[in-house]
Image: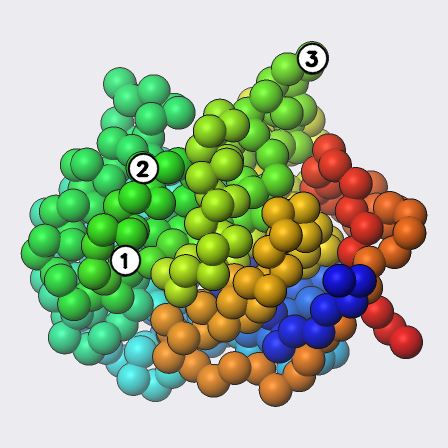
Amino acid sequence: MNKITLIQPDDWHVHFRDGDILKTVVPETDKNFGKCIVMPNLVPPIINGQMANEYKKRISKFLKNNLNLLMTIYLTENLKKHTLINAYKTKQVFAVKLYPLGATTNSENGIKDVENIIEILSTMEENDIPLLIHGEDTNPEIDIFDREKSFLDKVLTKITQNFPKLRITLEHITTKEAVQFILSSKNVVGSITPHHLASNRNEMLVGGIRPHLYCLPILKRDIHQQELIKIAISGNKKFFLGTDSAPHEIKLKENECGCAGVFNAPYSLQIITQIFDNHNALNKLENFVSINGTKHYKLPNNKKKVSLKKFKNPIKFNDYLGSKIKFKIYKPQFSIFWDYDNK
Ligand SMILES: [Zn+2]
């Protein structure tokens, strides 16, 4: 197959940041996707409907297409029931994001103990509000490569047992244990990033440290990467694309204490298409990028279609985006032959 036409894909997890950065990064997602779930981990975080709405307006200034912005609220231990219900019912907020305390960029307001949010989780279950989870155990004694597994064992098991009808997305999954957990649970689905499908920790650490591949959850070993690929290309409806595109300007990445995040929005679809092609699974691509997530979130499929074409020579990636503030664009180690077919 040298050409493929798909329902326009969606990105179920993206970071736009705020301020000057928006005009550089927002158009990349706007070009490629029909709907996106926007992460709330700004400084200060988005903690109510009004803040979400104002943030949405700031992002919207840089849209040229019809990107549907689905806003989220940052779950803190102080979130009040009426604040959430009001934000959700007025459609200012589409979902709630749970960060464990200190899990990643700007998560200082995250959850210390799930026991402290039982009431809110119960409200969400009653009102069918989706819960998005950064699933890592941030206890300092847990090895960074085991943080996801520990979270499944100690926290997520508890949440799913207590709230069997809560619609949960375990975001940016990185391990075979997460795949297994999702397969065996009734109410948990998973999003997967392009970089966790395309790269593993060797790429980040062998022959020199590559700070632009540093993200959280951290890249894992090859056996986990292979399990993620296997489940993504299977077409299983519980798994879908969430790019976790997370720009940081270069000086914050190439730094003594570099920030976590991979900026992949510009070529994420080309990369994913190549991976599916490499595994003879192009017939399942649309499920992963356009259908499964839409179904889980109970939304309509995008009306627009996009076509990609396989070229004879590898496509040439731009290394950077932006002029005054620059971002390094994620590029995997293998060649990408797929690009948009604009003819
Ligand atoms: Zn993220």
How packed is label 3: few (under 14 Cα within 10 Å), some, or many (20 or more)?
few
**Quadrant where the C terminus is found in the figure:** bottom right
Relative to 326, 265 lies left or right:
left
Q: Quadrant of residue 132?
A: bottom left
Relative to 89, 200 lies left or right:
right
Pinpoint residue 198: horizontal percent, then vertical percent: 61, 40
The answer to whether residue 265 is visible is no
Instruction: Identify the amino acid type marked 3.
Output: Gly
Q: Secondary structure at mark 1?
A: strand
What number is the disc on residue 207?
3
Between the C-alphas of marks 3 and 1, the distance is 38 Å
The answer to whether residue 177 is visible is yes
**Quadrant where the N terminus is found in the figure:** bottom right
For ligand 1, tell me if the residue under mark 3 lies within 8 Å: no
Q: Secondary structure at mark 2?
A: helix
Q: 238 and 253: which one is in front?
A: 238
Which of label 2 and label 3 is nearer to you? 2
Instruction: Identify the amino acid type marked 2.
Output: Glu
x 33%, y 26%: residue: 146
What number is the disc on residue 69?
none
What number is the disc on residue 188?
1
How packed is label 1: few (under 14 Cα within 10 Å), some, or many (20 or more)?
many
